[in-house]
Image (spheres, helix red, strand yellow):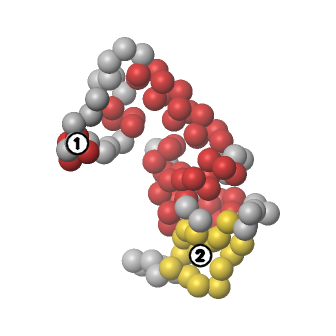
């Protein structure tokens, strides 16, 4: 059973960085989960929606893709995925980016 303040000691970090340091077969479990998420991102609406939230800017989608693949996606490729998804609606409001054009904001429709 967890102690009431166990959440204070939780350490968040890259799953890739953790592989090789976990007991039992947990490294294999994490590795399999990461690979599954890499291949299912954008093709599995439920998974992608859980990762992005109900509304999200393209900067969030970029960060998720980069964390899963280790490669920063090209902006043209990143825009193609949500714009071709019939479960997403492009919102008029744009999120201000630190530099460059404002990020497009997307909303899940159903």
- Secondary structure found at label 1: loop
Vertical side of 105 occupied by 71: above or below: above
- Label number found at residue 4: 1
Report the front residue among 18 and 78.
18
Residue that protrudes farthest toward the bottom in the picture: 92
The answer to which image quadrant residue 5 occupies is top left
| Residue 33 coordinates in the image, percent (x, y) | 53, 32
Q: Residues within 10 Å of mark 1 (few under 14, many from 20)?
A: few
For the question of whether residue 23 can be seen, the reply is: yes
- The residue positioned 45% from the left and 77% from the top of the image is 97
61 relative position to 67: left or right: right
Disc 2 target residue:
104
Name the one closer to the observer, 101 or 37.
Answer: 37
Identify the residue shown where x is 39% and y is 37%. 15
| For residue 44, side relative to residue 13 (left or right) | right
Q: Is residue 106 left or right of residue 95?
A: right
Query: Where residue 72 appears, x then y in whole percent?
Result: 49, 54
Residue 80 seen in render: no
**Which mark identifies residue 23?**
none
Secondary structure under tag 2 reads: strand
**Residue 66 higher or lower than 98, as above or below:** above
Q: Position of residue 27 (x, y in %)?
A: 41, 23
């Amino acid at each position: 059973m967890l102690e009431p303040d166990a959440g204070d000691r939780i350490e968040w970090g890259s799953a890739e960085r953790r592989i090789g340091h976990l007991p039992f077969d947990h490294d294999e479990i994490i590795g399999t989960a990461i690979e599954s998420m890499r291949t299912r991102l954008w093709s599995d609406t439920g998974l992608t929606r859980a990762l992005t939230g109900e509304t999200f800017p393209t900067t969030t989608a970029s960060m998720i893709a980069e964390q899963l693949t280790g490669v920063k996606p090209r902006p043209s490729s990143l825009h193609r995925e949500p714009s071709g998804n019939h479960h997403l609606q492009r919102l008029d409001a744009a999120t201000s980016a630190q530099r460059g054009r404002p990020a497009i904001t997307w909303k899940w429709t159903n």
